[in-house]
Image: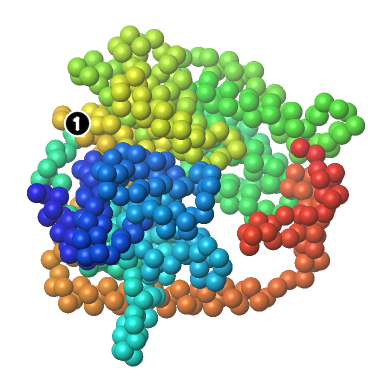
Amino acid sequence: LDREDVARPALEGKNIIICLPTGSGKTRVAVYITKQHLDSRRAEGRSGKVVVLVNKVPLVEQHYSAEFLPYLKQNYKVERVSGDSQLKISFTEIVKKNDVVICTAQILENYLERDNKGEDEGVKLSDLTLIVIDECHHTQKGGVYNHIMMRYLKQKHSNIRLKKQQKEPVPLPQILGLTASPGVGGATKMEKAEEHILRICANLDASKIMTRSLGEYKKEPMKTTMLVEDRKEDPFGDVIKKIMNAIHDHAQLTPTCDLGSQNYEQWVVQLEAKEEDQNVRVCTAHLRQYNEGLNLSNTIRMCDAFSFLNQYYEEEMKKKTLPDQEHTIQITDTERFLFSLFKENKRELQKLAENPEYENDSLSKLRTKILQEFSSRKEARGIIFTKTRRSAIALSQWIQENPKFADIGVKASYVIGGGDQSVVKPMTSAEQRDVLNKFRTGKVNLLIATTVAEEGLDIAACNFVIRYGLVTNEIAMIQAKGRGRAEDSSYTLVEVKNTGVAEKESVNEYRQKMMDKAIDKIRAMNQVNYDKRITDFQIQAIMEEKVRMTKKRQKDVKTVNPADVKFSCRSCSTHVCTGEDVEIIENMHRVNVTSQFGYELQF
């Protein structure tokens, strides 16, 4: 059995990484290993304790109900916990009472830290016998997976010392990492790619990386790239740029990159974060919205860009004019300038947005591609990946408002992330599940998704994937391609102005080939050399962690007098309180506890 070949070292109790493409049943292999692990321990009269770690809340429910529970419930107790769960009993009790617990990584990290600090209700690594780490390529500096594994590595190396002193070592769980692609960490040279993958192996204490070559069991989807032409004329975009330049002049700003590009957005965000002058800060906030509007106009329709900007200004005006006139909020000269600037140009923008003559070429290419896929296949089922939540929603509206799509049987819906962003309401896990179920049953046959769908979310086999103006890395590319699991599936890239997508995709392909070669080289390494490099990287990581902790402690010692720290309102610069009024709750939340604070605020 193929599954047994990949799983064999894990069945022998070794730590491994299983690297198999999206859609090839990695999780099923993990379930198989989990069952064998629990069975063999039970046969020896010892109990097993398995924790399955995921990095996204929706994956908890998915792994629980679709994978682990159905295969293990006959013989073992399986439970799931996520930040969304309302716990009736503590996580520690859940771990004690169950054989398999599926949870988000941060929950385990919090309880390991509790135990580390000697608090009640903690969890020790030695309480567990197997940890399964899903999407394990995230086990890198700064990530929560790495915090957990750093505890493991420290204990492993301290066990070596204990053995030398003929003392009893602390038992550690077996580790099983799962990924579709470890990536190359931005490497351009082979040895750097190898080093990146070896570091991930070291972080996961993996004795081997197990894989099969893609071609062995799955056809690569047919790939095409659709290049687009610039609009002959873009009067709508020209008006937005004119407004943005007027704001630049007003705030004395000189941008160094193209308006509407991702680089411009980064420039504005950094400026807003650093800027002390409140007037300039307000300008940068408005420039961000215009940049998003320009981006929407380049990606979707001008009317989507207009309604987005119009809604933003309506909401901003509402904030400034409260219904009870006692509380009139002072509008600064800069704000007055920004509001009137939009008002002066509003009618012209609206008129231009209604003119179909200026539609962007990306959208017409996308229309052609969707119509082609649906008319040439008996049962088309596809995913369009797009960059932002707003563009996913706007694309979905565009498809629903266009009768041509309905005529050939397109039933579209969108799925976006669950993290909170003030501008676009996030999707709850239940809403995501509902859309994905409809896609599975065929009630929806075209899914428009942000990258939330690229990693791990179980999406029924589809026969075409379109990346619409989306620049990401080689990991995401491999995962998106893996979504086209059906026979004769296609993978299309539609370029969008200012994204450099086509060029980025060829870099990704180069990196993918380099990654495959690097994995092959690592797999061919002599085990002694491999183990030596892994140990070196682990010792280096432990030293770096020590240095980081020392710096952190020194930083914590350098305390500032709280009375010297003054807080002002971000919008109007009014003094609000000092550091003496702020208390730290549960070691993380900073709360102003004074009674008058609430009275001074107007929402």
Judge by depth and name the residue closer to the eye, 337 or 137: 137
Q: What is the total number of numbered labels drawn onto the structure image? A: 1
- Relative side of 163 to 145, left or right: left
Using the rendered image of the protein, determine whether residue 102 is visible from the camera's viewpoint: yes
| x, y percent for residue 225 | 26, 33
Q: Residues within 10 Å of mark 1 (few under 14, many from 20)?
A: some
User: What residue sits right under mark 1 in the picture?
Assistant: 486
Question: At 16% from the left edge and 29% from the top edge, which residue is drawn?
Answer: 488
Question: At 30% from the left edge and 21% from the top edge, which residue is drawn?
Answer: 442
Judge by depth and name the residue closer to the eye, 7 or 46: 46
- Relative side of 389 to 314, left or right: left
Reply above or below: 350 against 146.
Answer: above
| x, y percent for residue 114 | 53, 65
Reply above or below: 192 against 538.
Answer: above
The residue at the far bottom in this view is 165
Reply above or below: 534 against 471.
Answer: below
Using the rendered image of the protein, determine whether residue 187 is visible from the camera's viewpoint: no
Is label 1 in a helix, a strand or a loop? loop
Question: At 37% from the left edge and 60% from the top edge, which residue is drawn?
Answer: 139
The residue at the far right in this view is 326
Q: Quadrant of the C terminus?
A: top right
Q: Quadrant of residue 524?
A: bottom left
Question: At 43% from the left edge and 51% from the top edge, which residue is drawn?
Answer: 104
Reply above or below: 61 against 512.
Answer: above
| x, y percent for residue 98 | 38, 53
Q: Quadrant of residue 40?
A: bottom left
Amino acid type, residue under disc 1 in the picture: Ala
Q: Indicate the colouring scheme.
A: rainbow
| x, y percent for residue 494 | 32, 31
